[in-house]
Image (spheres, grey):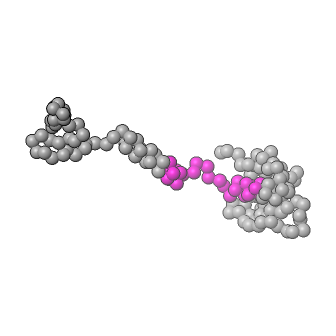
Amino acid sequence: MRLRVNGVARWDTARSVHPSTNVRAAPRGYTLVEILVVLVVMGLAAALVAPAFIPRSTEQGALQALTERARLIAIRRGEGVSLHIESSGGWRIEGLTSMKEGAIAVGRVADPPFSAVTLVFSPLGTSGPDVESTVAALRLGLNPLTCEAHAS
């Protein structure tokens, strides 16, 4: 549309009006900034939701979870603890310096070992089987230095 300003003909670029209908044309499409904002928001939403749909690749067995629990108890209490697993499946965690208190935790494992085993955990996070349980710990598939299950 041509306008006359001070005697000079100029195109009106502020309004986009179709010359034959005098109707303002609707803007078409999205700007690059709008598309990028939508992509960033969708990416953040996917990053927050994705871990719920991804299965855990390492399933801990009952024995591995129990040894990790005993290790954490030793670290949190700041004292050595022992984990006794009986051949019947019963287990108990006891403090080494506070034996008068009794067991810290007790329970049963679903798949008991064939022989009793005692594992000792230090407050620094290190662990190992006691001298009498070394062979039994090896048969269970535990690393003799860390009491963690061997990767199989």
* Residue 46 visible in the displayed image: no
Kindly identify the residue that appears in the image at 74 percent across and 67 percent down. Answer: 107
Instruction: Report the side of 62 relative to 42 (left or right).
Output: right
Residue positioned 72% across, 66% down in the render: 108
Q: Residue at point 77% right, 66% down?
A: 105
Is 128 or 124 nearer to us in this picture? 124
Q: Is residue 14 above or below residue 52?
A: above
Picture coordinates of residue 65 (x, y %)?
Answer: 69, 56
Residue 77 position within the rendered picture, expressed as x and y whole percent measured from the top left = 81, 59
What is the quadrant of the C terminus in the image? top right
Q: Looking at this rendering, what residue extends furthest in the left direction?
A: 20
Query: What residue is drawn where x is 44% and y is 44%?
Result: 40
Q: In front here: 19 or 97? A: 19
Q: Main secondary structure of the magenta part?
A: helix
Residue 25 in sight in this render: yes
Give the camera-side residue of 72 and 46. 46
Toward the bottom, the furthest residue is 101
Does the segment drawn in magenta span residue 58? yes
Q: Position of residue 1 (x, y in %)?
A: 15, 37
Quadrant for residue 90, please give it.
bottom right
Question: Is 1 drawn above or below residue 85 in the view shown?
Answer: above
Span shown in magenta: 46-72
Which residue is nearer to you in this view: 76 or 97?
A: 76
Furthest residue in direction top, as rendered: 8
Q: Could you say where residue 79 lies in the image, as x and y percent from the top left?
A: 85, 57
Say left or right for 126 vs 28.
Answer: right
16 drawn magenta? no
